[in-house]
């Protein structure tokens, strides 16, 4: 089976106020089609790890391999390209660009990738929105929709370039129960029906329960 | 420019795969659009005002041929004005755009 992501001996230090080690020799890999969740107490380093794995934070020791490619020596623009093409990222605070419509937000990473024409990307974006049950919101301004809807738009955006892996940092953390369940069902169907590779940091036990593998962290280490 | 209000947008762009130089281009483009629009409006209003002033009666014994306020419509002045408006917006936009390109998305996303 193909390995999508591999972390090798990752250490991370923060130097302010004094030097502390927040990630300690992190080693693991994620295979294609796997749904992995990361759990652990607040402050144990989950977000820090995810920022490193998503190539946004390069200030660390150890190696990161994504889809067979080593990330260590890559330049900023090369990493941006890899994020664009291979990684879909979903944040806790459903960040959208408020100056654009929902449709445009979903299209944006596709326009950046430039693999398809604008018309084709629009069609794909509408398909993703339809798949998540929110195609009726396409022409709305991004700041005119509810929090739960925003998070679904963010998921559609993460899917637009058919990424090798989707990463999420507590994607249900800021939602009410109803929307949490909707997003939960979306991840479950992405994993089961679409064989999407997923790496999700979560506090939600029911989310962890439906994943293929749970990585448990404590004080910057993987303990399980 | 408005980069402090746009930190979230910059972070999203970077997280979804826009490189620093893309962000710089976007911000330069915005400030130049503002510069061009502002410059054109300025030229248009300047021209309209000159035409109005040109109608004002101005009679003096020392210049018998002059009947209204003398106005110089030499295009060189318009070109200088347009160039000046573009140059100022470019410089006003350049440094913020450069700063925007250097924003670390992790700091913004974590800061929430
Ligand atoms: N910029 C920083 N400078 C110094 N220390 C930091 C910085 N960012 C995070 N830390 C520390 O690193 C540790 C890990 O933080 P991190 O945000 O990764 O935890 P987490 O597991 O995601 O927690 P939570 O569940 O609350 O989101 C914490 O002790 C935190 O205080
Ligand atoms: Mg966190």
Image (tube, coloured by chain):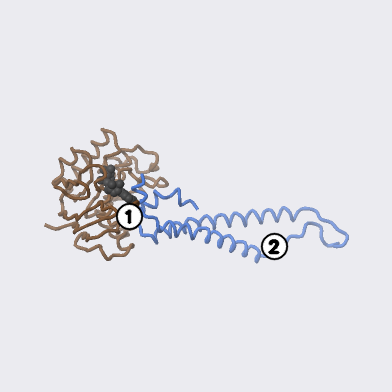
Chain colours: A brown, B blue
Give the image location of residue B70, x and y in percent. 77, 60
User: Measured along the vertical axis of the image, is residue A189 above or below residue A112?
Assistant: above
Q: How many marks?
A: 2
Q: Nearer the viewer, mark 1 or mark 2?
A: 1
Residue B77, picture quadrant:
bottom right
Q: Is residue A126 visible?
A: no
Q: Is residue A59 visible?
A: yes
Give the image location of residue A21, x and y in percent. 26, 53
Q: Is mark 2 within 8 Å of ligand 1?
A: no
**Residue occupying the far left of the picture:** A1
Judging from the image, what secondary structure is the residue with disc 2 in? loop
Give the image location of residue B24, x and y in percent. 43, 59
Decide if residue A122 is on the left or right side of residue B32. Answer: left
User: Measured along the vertical axis of the image, is residue A3 above or below residue A44?
Assistant: below
- Residue located 87% across and 62% down the image: B62
Position of the N terminus of chain A by quadrant:
bottom left
Q: Which residue is mark 1?
A: A15
Q: CA distance from mark 1 to mark 2?
A: 64 Å
| Chain of the residue under label 2 | B
**Residue occupying the far top of the picture:** A177
| CB under 8 Å between discs 1 and 2 | no
User: Measured along the vertical axis of the image, is residue B75 above or below residue B16?
Assistant: below
Q: Which residue is mark 2?
A: B73
**Residue occupying the far right of the picture:** B61
Question: In this orientation, which residue lies closer to the viewer: B104 or B28?
Answer: B104
Residue A152, picture quadrant:
top left
């Amino acid at each position: 089976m193909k390995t999508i992501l591999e972390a090798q001996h990752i250490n991370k230090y923060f130097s302010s106020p004094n030097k502390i080690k927040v990630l300690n020799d992190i080693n693991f890999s994620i295979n294609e089609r796997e749904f992995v969740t990361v759990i652990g107490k607040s402050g144990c380093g989950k977000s820090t790890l995810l920022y490193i794995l998503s190539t946004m934070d390069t200030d660390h020791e150890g190696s990161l391999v994504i889809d067979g490619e080593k990330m260590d020596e890559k330049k900023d623009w090369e990493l941006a390209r890899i994020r664009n093409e291979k990684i879909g990222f979903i944040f806790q605070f459903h960040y959208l660009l408020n100056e654009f419509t929902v449709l445009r937000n979903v299209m944006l990473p596709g326009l950046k990738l430039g693999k398809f024409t604008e018309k084709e990307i629009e069609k794909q974006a509408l398909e993703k929105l339809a798949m998540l049950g929110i195609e009726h919101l396409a022409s709305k301004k991004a700041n005119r929709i509810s929090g739960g809807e925003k998070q679904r738009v963010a998921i559609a955006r993460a899917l637009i370039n058919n990424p090798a892996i989707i990463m999420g940092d507590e994607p249900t953390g800021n939602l009410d129960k109803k929307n949490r369940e909707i997003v939960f069902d979306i991840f479950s169907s992405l994993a089961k029906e679409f064989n999407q590779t997923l790496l999700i940091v979560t506090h939600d036990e029911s989310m962890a329960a439906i994943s293929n593998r749970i990585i448990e962290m404590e004080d910057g280490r993987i303990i399980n | 420019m408005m980069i402090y209000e746009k930190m979230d947008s910059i972070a999203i762009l970077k997280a979804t795969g826009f490189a620093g130089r893309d962000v710089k281009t976007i911000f330069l483009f915005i400030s130049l659009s503002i510069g061009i629009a502002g410059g054109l409006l300025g030229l248009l209003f300047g021209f309209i005002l000159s035409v109005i002033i040109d109608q004002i009666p101005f009679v003096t014994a020392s210049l018998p041929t002059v009947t209204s306020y003398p106005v110089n419509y030499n295009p060189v002045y318009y070109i200088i004005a347009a160039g000046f408006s573009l140059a100022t917006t470019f410089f006003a936009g350049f440094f913020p755009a450069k700063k925007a390109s250097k924003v670390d998305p992790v700091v913004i996303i974590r800061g929430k």
